[in-house]
Image: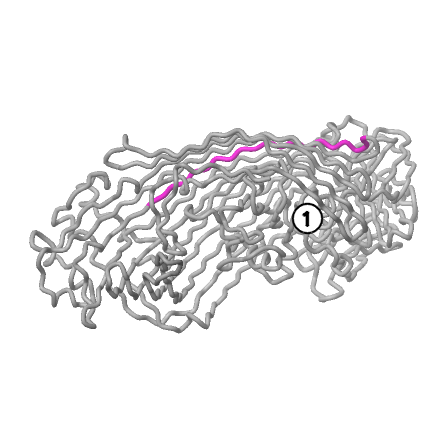
Amino acid sequence: MLICVLTSSAATAASSSGSAGDAVVSIYVFKQGVPVGGADVVADGRTIGLTNNHGSLHVLLREGWHDIVVSHQGAVVKQLNLKLKSDERIRIILAQPSPDYPASTDIESSEGTKIIGGANSASKLATTDKGMISGMVTSLESKAPLPGVRVFISGVSGAVKTDTEGKYETAVPVGKYSVSFVHPEFSTQIYKDIVVTKDQATTKSTELTPAGEDLGEFVVNAPTVEGGYKALADERRQSSSVKDVIGAKQMSNAGASDAAGALKRVTGLTLVDGKYIFIRGLGERYSSVLLNNASLPSPDPTRRVVPLDLFPTGVLSGVVIQKTYSPDMPGDFSGGVVQLRTLGELAEEPESNISVQLKYNSNTTFKEGLVYEGGSTDYLGIDDGGRQLPGLVDAETDGGVKPGELSEQAAESFPQIYNTTPSTLPPGIKLKMLFSDIFEPLDSDYGWGYNLALNYENDWKLKDEIRNTYSGDGAGGVVLENEVDREQTENEINLGGLLNFIFEAGESHRFESNTILTRQSTKSVIVDNGYLSENDINVRDTTLEWRETQLFSQQFRGEHSFSALNDLELDWHATLSQALRDVPFTRFYRYVENSGVYSLTTDNVHQIRYESLEDNTADFALNLTYPIYDLFGSFTKIKMGVSSISKDRESQTLRFNWISPITIDPDILKDPNPENIFTDANIGADGFSIFNGTQPTDNYVAKQTLSAAYLMTEVEANDKWSFMAGARIEDNNQNVTTFELSNPDESVVGEIISRDVLPAASVTWAFNKKMQLRAAASATVNRPDFKELSKAPYIDPVTRDIIIGNPELEQANIT
């Protein structure tokens, strides 16, 4: 059933762009009970607009006769000849059961004349006698009440919405009415000849059939989504690139509470650690993550990833994975782009949701792991200050700048926390809260609302790895150099929130604010037991680490359409983001086996390390889309835009090495608890000392400015063929300077300066209604990350390998 409704509900918005005396016409289109977006409406031979995802279009037409043609996918739905009066408000409903049947028509006018179908309503509007009409709307399948159903009553402007209990009630003049029940996820129901009498309550309840079974084929591919099945299908057909998408409804129906859980079902994606996405087998450095088309730094700046489990389904309208390049995407494009799309429309009704999960892992829960004494607020993922650089050390080294041996008092000021103890690991816990509300003043086209999501997770992991190192023997074979058994206990705490605020000014202008704050903290004990052939010794290395990463992002964005400019669309965003990484007071110490007994080694390998990193990003963009509805018989869109991205990073590492005394009682070193060895009594002139061993390449600063502009066109030649062509130009200036804190003039610079023209073209052949064949060609680049251009060594948080970059790296060109 295809339904097309013209109503007067947008009178305020329409009159703002027209002249006094124009008639207000609103159009709603439905097919088989589901709203149809993209239906073409032509008045007097001129296209006046397309219906939106709710199947509606609101326009102003001058007084007099008008020929109106409504069509969808090249097929005419209805032709109408209407005579409009000054200041008239009119509503039309077209209902088409299937493409093989003509659309039925129900048109109402505020002038009191029933133009098509039903009884004359003039008597209803002329009288002041009123009655009540009320009822309840439920789902035929689940029998549950349906909130947010729009109830249209013939001859009455606007629509009534059902409340949270599925109920509605409104007063209307006495008379005979047609009542329509409309919801985007259910088949529309229309009842005629509903009689309302004076001072009496008329009840009309109904059950709506879910429309999902009619849309089962609309599952995966689409360029953009607003979360519903219909939007996914329309966007998929119009895509000029190869994309996969999961909408909010699909996430929810699949039982996924966040984007990461839902994307497990997407072909060509690999989900790592339940949160990170690899596209087509390519790692994180070959993928980009965008939030509403704005770049988003990783909460762990040592990795080029954003954990998708931070985004609950309640605040996302969809997640899009684009696998082929188009000029409106960043030119640094290899594996693909993950686009996170927040809700762009007001919710139908207020909502609150709280979920609590207990997590059981057969490899970890109630098993024994190693822990160490931390801070009082570790359970929140926030250090209580006990791990920060001691004030005496900070003063003596001028913040780590001055090298040399620390005084005895400064050495003793480090917390003496080294011991690990076995402990039974508890189940993990996950808490998620979602709150949303809307505010829509009566008789106004303005509305605003918010979505607030909060999450907390505390989980444990036990890892057991065998790490062997091999080298060549000079004769074509390999020999085992190091053989290490690693046992790792991790306590990971995630704490975050997302606030999404939306303001709508009619149907043509929307403003949105997105605020994201997320923290991820990891408390680790890493024990390596093994053999080192270089020293011919058996060792037991222990690392105690606390790692905090934080992402803050504030985005403002807007979407605007201008019907007076042939439906020109403009969108923009301004996004400021900051990523922080703090790894304070990491401790490393080694025990060496001698005659079956392990003793603390007197080699100067014991170390205390502090790491910090700050990454700031500013992203601004402006895009224009101009539709040409009939260019030599085709539908064409011309898109152009400009963007500017500025990034800067500062990374600092401080290293303090324990220096062993020349002579020390061997029995002291045999104590398995290092806290009994690194005591104040053993620190001093004849004991242990601490030396500032920060390396010349331990610190770096980096900057990048990236300016871009693009022009592209998308042409729908006919129902079977569509084309895309365009190019993007990017000016990139990337600079990484690695330096010694005590001598910043001695530095190593890695720099990339380039101007790249990146073309792209694609052709799509829809050889039947259910299948399409796409071919695409493009030129893109892959640029080194900041850390890859710096000689500052860092420890990979996953592999624990020491990574050193290369300032001589160049960008790769991909065709």
**Residue 29, percent from left and from top:** 80, 46
Which residue lies most toward the top here?
19
**Residue 706, percent from left and from top:** 50, 32
> Label 1: which residue?
222
Left or right: residue 534 compared with residue 562 = left
Residue 182 is inside the magenta segment: no
Which residue lies most toward the front here?
475
* Vertical comparison of 490 with 737: above or below: below
Left or right: residue 293 compared with residue 157 = left
Q: Amino acid at mark 1?
A: Ala
Describe the colour scheme in one phrase.
one colour
Give, as a single range, the part of the protein colored magenta: 612-631
Along the line of sight, the residue nearer the viewer: 426 or 90: 426
Number of numbered discs overlaid on the protein picture: 1
**Residue 147, percent from left and from top:** 68, 56
Q: Looking at the rendering, which quadrant does residue 196 occupy? A: bottom right
Predominant SS of the magenta segment: strand
Seen at 15% across and 46% down, the residue is 406
Seen at 36% across and 55% down, the residue is 800
Circle 1 crowding by C-alpha within 10 Å: few under 14, some 14–19, many from 20 = many
Left or right: residue 509 compared with residue 330 = right
The quadrant of the image that shows the C terminus is top right
Along the line of sight, the residue nearer the viewer: 158 or 498: 498
Whether residue 319 is visible, yes or no, is yes
Whether residue 136 is visible, yes or no, is no
**Residue 530, percent from left and from top:** 30, 65
Looking at the rendered structure, the secondary structure element under dot 1 is loop
Along the line of sight, the residue nearer the viewer: 13 or 466: 466
Seen at 26% across and 43% down, the residue is 695
